[in-house]
Image (cartoon, rainbow, N blue to C red):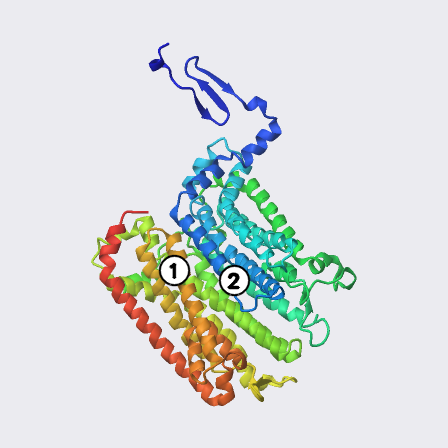
Amino acid sequence: MPASERRPVRVRGPREYRCPAVSVKVRFDFLMPPVVRWMSDLLPTNPIAVRIVAGGSKRPRHLLLRAGYLAVMISILLLGLLGGDSSMKALATRGSSAFALVSFGQVGLICVLTPIFMAGAIVQEASPRTWDILLTTPLGNLQIVLGNLFGRLFFILALLFSTLPLFVLTQFFGGVPGAAIFTSYAIAASSALIVATTAVTLSVTRSAGKRAVFVFYAAVIMYLFATYAADVYAGKRAMIGVGTGARHTSIFTAFNPFLALESALHSTSYAAYAPSEVPFKPVAALYTAPAASFCLMCVGLSFAMVLWSTLRLRVIGTRGPQVSWWRALLGSGPNAGGTRQSRRVGANPIAWRERMLRSQSVGGMFGRWAFLALGACLGIVLCGLHRQGTISSPDLQLALLAIVGAEIAVVLLTAVSLSATAVSREREDGTLDILLTTPIQPGPYLAGKLTGMVQFLIPMLLVPFVTLGTVAIYTLAKGFGAPQGVTITQTIGLTSTVLPLMLPEGALLVLIDLVAATSFAIMVGLQWSLRTKGTIGSVMAAIGVLGVIGLVLGVCAAALGNSIPYVGAAAAAASPLNMLFATVDPSAWIGESMKSDVGAARTSLAIGTIVASVVFGAACFGMHAAMKRSFMMTVRRLAGTN
């Protein structure tokens, strides 16, 4: 055969060999034992995992996330190693401190970045069309579940192992044992595994849609706040010695990744119990080995969720259109009979539509009011426990900071998630293309979005006010005869000052500051929703921008509060969380102002709240004017894309 007519032999797949000349297809599957072939199909050659890894590796967003992650970790390490003393002992101390700082930063970034990488598992795979196609393929249930899980978890694990050279570098300075490095990696990987498995479970069972991505952040923040506060409260009763500052771990340590990591890295000041000293023998492992217990619980829960997802996978394919019992009870299902009266739309139809659209679901109907009722109940429970003497005044302050801080974080995250999807969601479902054909102008459209979302969030905005207001009334009523009173003696500088449990006017000040900050957060979310094609990208960008702004404002306000009288108290209004801290524990956050004059400090808080509200309002007005000018060009440029 001439050389020009020869055709090269090509490999068509990983397990077949085809020779065009004789047209023979040789399978190599018989060379592999059935068990090995089955295990290979589950993970290494899983087509879903291969597709996700191959596709995600080409995305610029993932590349930027990896580069940004490494840049942040390198910066944290370099800042921790800075120092003037170059002796071996000083270098070992700084190396140990830098390692601890990098470890905590790694766990924190993993908790933030894992939902971003897992967002596709909820948004893309939760689509009925995607699942309908997957269910017609020869793939097994376990293959589909593990492919979605480990295909996206691969990127998180790649981020973790990319920092291994940084951890090895700290050993050159001494003071960092090798076991601590592996413990840090195990806790971070376990945290990523449990979050990723939860996302895949929600996707497979169709338990939630796109909102589940945003609920992740709210749930993680509330969980970390609650377990940390509970551990601090329990740790006060488990001190080691007098004046040493060391304490034992608690039963809550094994349920929080940061506390588990702290018990492993700071074993001298945060020591685990000896087996003979465990307070509750049936769960002795939680006290003696919190880090290992945390990892085992994460792996066990992940295995259970994978098993549940595998068993429930095919059920979703046989489900027909059903009406929930609560919709049938309320008459809001698709088969609800009869007619209803027309509703008053109001001056701005966009505001009415935005408010009513989010209130139609059962979660929107009952979730906000249940959240409000929960806030009121928590305030009453705290006051009741304090009056009975179950908790002390410092414990009440700690619980109030943890509960209301979590409530404020949930409100702000909800506002961002709603606003960042307000325009991009309509672009994805094609509603925006219809709206562009109506006479609605950009100004009323954006103003209606802001007004409607604020009206929808009113019950949630009242939750911190109700919780703080309950304690404020309890404080003004002198505790209704509480034996321990409602005052705390605080040492500010060299003087002792008697302060109430909280500044009663702080409940109203926190509400005003929170409304202004929420309006600003909504405008930031609208801006990114206007400029971004997809909902996930707009939400992540808005959360990142607001996170940086909140961090800068919070750190600056805390520094001013402890250094400059009166001005520092007024600066606390720059962030709702800082205002909360200054209201509940003023001696620690605005100590300079309280040391000079308590009355003037309280007046400064009120003045700062008014000024901050005006500044936030001016920022909202400026952003509204800027978006109104560029609205038509931006929206029409992205119209029709998804």
Q: Which residue is mark 1?
A: 542
- Circle 1 SS class: helix
Residue toward you, 312 or 329: 312
Residue at the (64%, 76%) spot, across then down: 391
Quadrant of res 31? top right
- Numbered marks: total: 2
Asked whether, in this view, residue 161 is left or right of residue 533, the answer is right
Kindly identify the amino acid type of the residue bearing the numbered disc 1.
Ala
- Circle 2 SS class: helix
Q: Is residue 359 visible?
A: no
Image quarter (top left, top right, bottom left or bottom right) of the N terminus:
top left
Q: Is residue 631 visible?
A: yes
Residue toward you, 353 or 110: 110
Kindly identify the amino acid type of the residue bearing the numbered disc 2.
Ile
Q: Which residue is mark 2?
A: 221
Q: For mark 1, does the 10 Å Cα neighbourhood hold few (<14), some (14 to 19), or many (20 or more) residues?
A: many
User: In x, y percent, where is residue 385?
Assistant: 63, 75
User: Does residue 286 sit above or below 8 in this rendering?
Assistant: below
Residue toward you, 244 or 608: 244
Q: Which residue is outermost to the right?
A: 276
User: In x, y percent, where is residue 558?
Assistant: 47, 75
Quadrant of res 552? bottom left
User: In x, y percent, where is residue 353?
Assistant: 32, 60
User: In x, y percent, where is residue 577?
Assistant: 47, 72
